[in-house]
Image: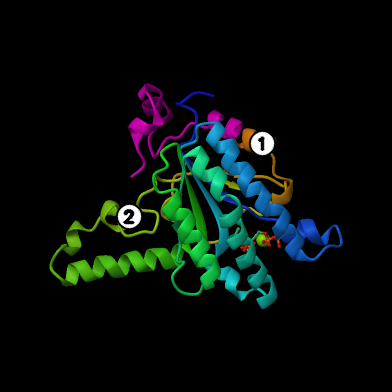
Amino acid sequence: MNERTLPRHIAIILDGNGRWATSRGLPRTKGHESGVHKVRLAARACHERKIPVLTVYAFSAANWSRPAEEVDNLMRICREFAEDAHDELVSRGVRVVVVGDIDDEVPTATRKATERLIADTAGGTSMTLALALNYGGRRDMVNAMRAVAAQARAGLLLPEDIDPVSVRRFLSTSELPDADLVIRTGGEQRLSDFLPFEAAFAELFFTETLWPDFSEATLDDALAFYARRQRRFGRTDEQVGRTATTAEIGSI
Ligand code: IPE
Ligand code: IPE
Ligand code: MG
């Protein structure tokens, strides 16, 4: 694996916690509690493999419709992650950011622990870990469109000048590169409102492995899959063959 074949941005849809627990006769929350350790493992493994950006889908805007007790437990687990992973992420120089909306519905304790993690890791330069927390891709795009419309109304942007770059600037992922590789555990083959704009050209890796069973081997399978892909961004095989790196081809 070299720089040319390594994704710059891996985005993980961590799925299968509930089924992992249910198949063992445990409450679903036990699956989430097991799964959170794998978020730390994934961050560590990506850091060691020099992946610049990892985004993990921790809680979707649609997940609020789960039973209140499960939602409360998920929010508690998110808080505990922010507290427990704090020292390791600081010492590894990992910068943590949140994509999604932690201002509104997220309980104060979870929000505060997450904000502290963001503030204390702000100087990290070795890797970015983006936590997709209360994230919904459509909502993020609607928010961006509102901001673009407000600029147009204020006369700062002409409608004919609106392009992918001007829209992307207002997404909550604006500081992140496009996703190169999306991994979904748990066997489903769907995006569930994850990064609809940013993953437009991403390679998609689906595995039956349930998230609490995720390991470095799963990550390495996904990286090997990615390295075998030829990313064409609309061009022909011949054109791409002449281009030195996918970074040169660009995505938007
Ligand atoms: C993913 O596991 C965790 C979150 C969505 C927060 P699930 O809880 O969706 O697990 P399954 O899909 O029900 O097995
Ligand atoms: C996607 O998983 C959301 C997260 C991983 C946080 P879900 O389990 O909520 O997705 P669906 O319901 O199968 O689409
Ligand atoms: Mg699920």
Vertical arrangement, residue 234 with respect to residue 103, above or below: above
- The quadrant of the rendered image in which ligand 3 is seen is bottom right
Residue 175, compared with residue 150, is above or below; it is above
- The residue lying toward the viewer, choosing from 217 and 118, is 118
Q: Where does residue 114 sit, x and y in percent of width and height?
A: 50, 60
**Comparing marks 1 and 2, which lies closer to the viewer?**
1
Q: How is the image coloured?
A: rainbow
Q: Residue furthest right?
A: 25
Please tell me how many numbered marks the rendered image carries: 2
Residue under the point 46% across and 57% down:
98
Residue ID for mark 2: 168
Where is mark 1, residue-wise? Answer: 216
Is 238 above or below relative to 82? above
x then y, percent, for residue 182: 54, 46
| Magenta stretch encompasses residue 144 | no
What's the amino acid at mark 2? Arg
Span highlighted in magenta in the image: 223-252
Q: Would residue 14 be found to the left or right of residue 140 on screen?
A: right
